[in-house]
Image (tube, rainbow, N blue to C red):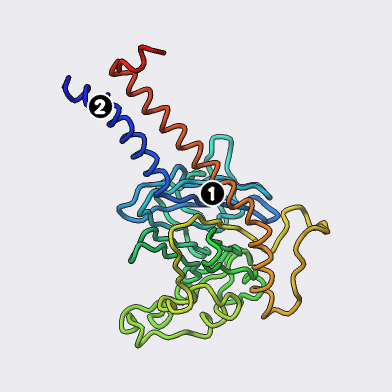
Amino acid sequence: MASQLRLLGTPTSIAFLILSFFQGSVCGITFTFTNRCGDTVWPGLLSGSGTPPLESTGFALSPGQSRSLYAPQGWSGRFWGRSGCDFDSSGKGSCSTGDCGSGEVECRGAGASPPATLAEFTLDGAGGKDFYDVSLVDGYNLPMLVQAAAPDCPDTGCLNDLNERCPDELRADDGRACRSACEAFGSPEYCCNGAYGNPDTCHPSQYSQLFKSACPKSYSYAYDDATSTFTCNHTDYTITFCPKSTPFSGKSNKNSSRRPSHEQLEDEVWLASLKASDAGAMKATPWLASVALQFALTVAVVVMLVGVDHPLFSLL
């Protein structure tokens, strides 16, 4: 044990420990959640099997508010927004849409109850790339935009309010959400199971095509991979709820981006403007989080070295 402590206290091992901690911090990425809706949104977070939970599994975001969370290398999971929530002072309650059934603000390993718009991520997947998508396979409740910090990586999401064009037979929660055809009817041809459990037999339905026409970059049914999954080389991400809204009660803002009226141009032109306007905030927040994490890890190393009574500290 004494020899291990002496080894821990050598200058070389000190440098190795600090560099190892710093390397670990930069291997992960930062997710920043932003609420541009007119009402509070409660993001829910679920880590995939075999990956650790993040710092939080659910929290509140007031209109205009943002929050960042760090994810380690190799993390996978999904995010969604809960709406119409009612939580008491102790954090107990439930949500009208996207509820995770935990009875709390924190979802604690529970997923979203359909219908819910989902953002799905796999970090450091095949070829070392991040894979990400926005899925409407489980239905829709809130507009969502996913932006990668790297400028050459595509945005994805569902900007349009599908609740406004949702067919009556798919409407849920008094028009605050839109169910998938699978949830509404349970038929194998809509759920892509049974005899329809492969891409050769399961094809887009009239309902999935409605979702796809409104949100062409989002998953509309189970085998919609070709136009709905995106990759990027290890970067930070921002998830924005209600990206086309301003969270300040409809008052016009002369500095806000003007959106073109032509619907086919709107996604590409206005998204580019939005990405440019948010670039500074997207870069600053992850950098500050990284610096804070590195400082905390350095302090931890110093405290550990003090504990072994290294001669270096007798000079302080």
Q: Secondary structure at mark 2?
A: helix
Residue drawn at the location 56% of the way across and 67% of the way down: 155
Sequence-wise, the earlier of marks 1 and 2 is 2
Residue drawn at the location 37% of the way across and 53% of the way down: 75
Q: In the shown orientation, is residue 37 left or right of residue 94? A: right
Nearest the viewer among 155 and 288 is 288
Q: Position of residue 95 (x, y in %)?
A: 56, 52
Nearest the viewer among 245 and 73 is 73
Label 2 neighbourhood size at 10 Å, few (<14), some (14-19), many (20+)?
Answer: some
Look at the picture and state if 106 lies above or below 196: above
Locate the C terminus and report the quarter of the image it occupies: top left
Look at mark 1 in the image and give the residue it sits on. 94
Look at mark 2 in the image and give the residue it sits on. 8
- Mark 1, mark 2: which one is toward the viewer? 2
Q: Position of residue 48 (x, y in %)?
A: 36, 56
Label 1 neighbourhood size at 10 Å, few (<14), some (14-19), many (20+)?
Answer: many
Locate the N terminus and report the quarter of the image it occupies: top left
**How far is mark 1 from mark 2, CA to CA?**
50 Å
Q: Position of residue 311 (x, y in %)?
A: 31, 15
Look at the picture and state if 25 lies above or below 143: above
